[in-house]
Amino acid sequence: MRGIGRLRNAIAGMEGLFASLGLANVALGTSSILIPLMIVHGLGGSVAQVGLQSSAASLMGVLGSVVWGHLADTVSRRKALLVLSVVVLGLAYVGMAFARSFPVLLASVATQSFFWAATGSVSVLLVIHQGEKHAWEQKIGRLNQVTALGWLCGLVLGSAALSAAARFTTEAVATRGLFFLLAGIGAGATLLAIRLVPRQAASSERIPLPITPPARPDGGPPHAAPQVARHLEERLPALLSAKDARDRALRLLLAQTLLVWMGVGFFAVPLPILLAERFLIPSAQVFLYYVLLDVGVIAAYPFASRWSARAGNSAVQTVGLFSRFALCLVGAAFLLLSPSAPPWIALALYFLVIGISYSFLQLSGVALASRLAREENRGRILGLFNAVIGAGMIVAGVGSGYLAQGFGYAAPFAAAAFLLLLALFALHAMGHPAPSAGKQPGRPAGEVEE
């Protein structure tokens, strides 16, 4: 009976964690588009300021991961860190609702990103300590599914709320009111965390997590980032020295990853403002296009995973890169040649393909890094891989905003296409180096297991 009771408590605790983080991601999904719209419609800001807040959020998220990654190993109770991050999540939305200037909004966004980074380390540690080591991937995968669903629900909520509010008030007032609603959702997530998440004492064991989560396709925070930035302090030169073809390929992959996510950022950061400012699409409809993007991501993941197993990660990465390159090139050409907005059906298909291409890029990139890393260094390499993604988004946030403001929206799209083309060449140059351990069973000599 005691065993059954312990099992019931573990399940209840895990469900409580999923419920709290899922609800919090409803708020995050809404605010991922609401914040750029607030800058332009509520504060009269520019697309350059949208890029600046994106970069600031990414930078504070990386710094926060360093701090909270350390604390997750040293504090006596990890639950307190999780509760603190969710509390600040809700309070930051109150600050955004009352913001009357861009610096105040930027401070609220940066504070939220810093404290929300705590959930990266803590949520994964709480999940994996609930079960056996062989079930880690399954548990982390379920956590990512729950938070992804929450994010998608948040996009739907944003569209529905702004559409309903438009009948009674202005868009600026509706946007501020929606931030108060998000603060209430954050309070609900806090109550769930306090009541349902089990306490978990810190451990001195450093857990080499086997997978990394998807970064958001719209530049928002990851679903459930594991202990990413703690690896930044590790000494990595020895890991990346050119010992053999495998190590050189890994170093080239990291450089290619920087190009990929700079390209993704140059494309993604100004996109919602392009819809609202140049195409004059209502904010509620902007949210719907991002719903389609997220549907594309979720729907394509199973297919991308199966195809990766059959054709190899390099092939999947090539298709993802080429499709995103084509999307950027087509977008830049349209913006240069046409003064009007495209038909809604064309935009809907465009956003759906964005989501599909993203799933190909993210899944194959993580898998390539995992396969090229040596067993003894895999955790640190995956941490570095996520840090490189963050660095790319930081650069892209500032660069894309100022390019769009100074030269028009076609400029960041063209820059994204150029960066993705360079990433394609880098992927081709990486080739198929042989693994250091020798030939893998069932594969030709000289080909790495992808």
Image (cartoon, rainbow, N blue to C red):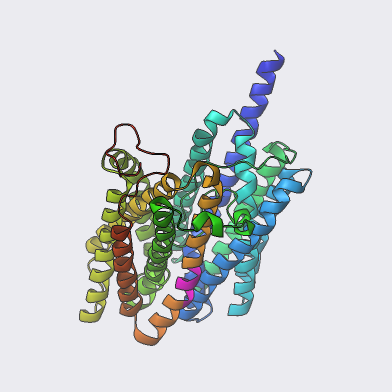
Q: Position of residue 5 (x, y in %)?
A: 69, 19
Specify whether 36 is left or right of 130.
Answer: left
Task: Tell me what residue is drawn at x 53 percent, y 79 percent.
Answer: 43
Q: Count the marks: how many?
A: 0
Magenta stretch in the rendered image: 393-398
Pick the front one: 7 or 204:
204
Residue sitting farthest toward the right: 76
| 38 lies above or below 48 | above
Q: Is residue 396 magenta?
A: yes
Residue sitting farthest toward the bottom: 406
| 35 lies above or below 444 | below
Quadrant of the drawing holding the N terminus: top right
Task: Tell me what residue is drawn at x 57 percent, y 30 percent.
Answer: 133
Query: Can residue 88 be seen?
Result: no
Identify the main secondary structure in magenta: helix
Task: Tell me what residue is drawn at x 59 percent, y 62 percent.
Answer: 62
